[in-house]
Every structure is written in C-alpha cells, then in structure tokens.
Image (tube, rainbow, N blue to C red):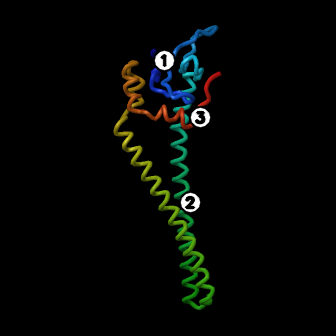
Amino acid sequence: MENLPLRGFLKCPKCERMLSGSASKGRNAYYNYYHCSSSCGTRFKADMVDIFIEAFISDFNKQTKAQNSERTNIIGEIDALNKRYQNALLKNADGEMADDDFQEVKKLTKGRIEKLEQRLNDLAIINSEIKDLVASALKKVANLDRRYENGDIEEKRAKLVRCSLISWCLTEHDIEPHE
C-alpha cells in the first residue's frame, strides 16, 4: 500500500507484534492507519506516525543546538574567570591585593574553572558519541529522504529496514494509539 510504507516494520507498543496497515473509508476520503491484530486493538493514524518521526528529528536537532549553546556559555564563563584570575594576579604583584585575598580568589576561580572544564569535557564526550552515531547513520542512509520520496513502495520498505529507529521510537517514546 503506497500510503503505508512502514507496514510490517513497526512493533506494537502493547504486544510487540508487527503492525499492519489499512485504509478506512471516511465520509469524504480514505484514512490510513497502522494497526495491530483485532484482539490487541492498537491503532495509529499513519499521518501521526510521520509527524512523530519529523518531531523526533527536530528534537534531536534542538538538543544538539542546546549543547552547542551550553558549550559557548561555559567557554565564556571560563574566559571571564581566567580574566578575573589574571587581574587578581596583577593586583597581587603590584601590591594592590593582599596575599590572603589573592589565594582566596585563586582558590575560587580555579575551582570553578575545573568544574566548568569537566562539564565541557562531558559535553565533548556526548557530542563525540552523537557525531559518531550520526556519521555512521549518514553513511548508511545518504540522501535517504530523496531516495525515499522518489522510490516506489518496495524501495521505501527496503530503506526502512535499514532504519530500525522507527520501531524503537514508537515503543520508547510512548506514542499514543488512536482510539
């Protein structure tokens, strides 16, 4: 069925069987659904599954932007703390700041810098893992969107086999079934 390319590739979040798909005739049009067996009763509007996948990708992009923003803020805070430390060092060297005060400024700024650098390292590890995952996925699905849009139903289904993310999305992110 042309409008249900994910049929047979999505797992039911209730019973874990593979979802089938069909169209139901409404008053003015046909409406497509992915559904489980009649005994289970789980059913999703096909267009809602598509919307979810787009939202999932959008959320991933927002998370990456948020990490980049946090990284920029941390770097800015580290720079400000380094300037504060340098100013205190110069004042101490010029006799404008007592040694005890300098040691306190040094302790506070260096401690905060260490914490920020650790957070920056944590972000780098997360970012590296994301980049590796994305690079691997991109190698496997280069131009997938265009190939998917232009492909016939069999090509769409074959490409989706390579992208098992969809079943995971439905089960892990609690997509609500259509009543």
Reading the image, the residue beneath label 2 is 73
> Label 2 neighbourhood size at 10 Å, few (<14), some (14-19), many (20+)?
few
For the N terminus, the quadrant is top left
Within the image, what quadrant is residue 25 found in? top right
Q: What residue is drawn where x is 53% and y is 58%? A: 72
Q: Marks 2 and 3: which is nearer the front?
A: 3
Residue 45's x, y, as percent? 58, 22
Asked whether the viewer can see residue 112, the reply is yes
Within the image, what quadrant is residue 137 found in? top left
Lower position in the chain sequence, tag 2 or tag 3? 2
Reading the image, the residue beneath label 1 is 3
Mark on residue 75? none
Q: What residue is drawn where x is 38% and y is 21%? A: 151
Horizontal placement of 33 versus 136: left or right?
right
Mark 3: secondary structure: loop
**Type of amino acid at the residue the image marks with label 3:** Asp
Q: CA distance from mark 2 to mark 3?
A: 33 Å
**Type of amino acid at the residue the image marks with label 2:** Asn
Within the image, what quadrant is residue 93 found in? bottom right
The vertical placement of 87 against 178, above or below, is: below
The vertical placement of 96 against 154, above or below, is: below
Reading the image, the residue beneath label 3 is 174
Lower position in the chain sequence, tag 3 or tag 1? 1
Q: Nearer the viewer, residue 118 or 99?
A: 118
Horizontal placement of 59 versus 137: left or right?
right
Q: Marks 1 and 2: which is nearer the front?
A: 1
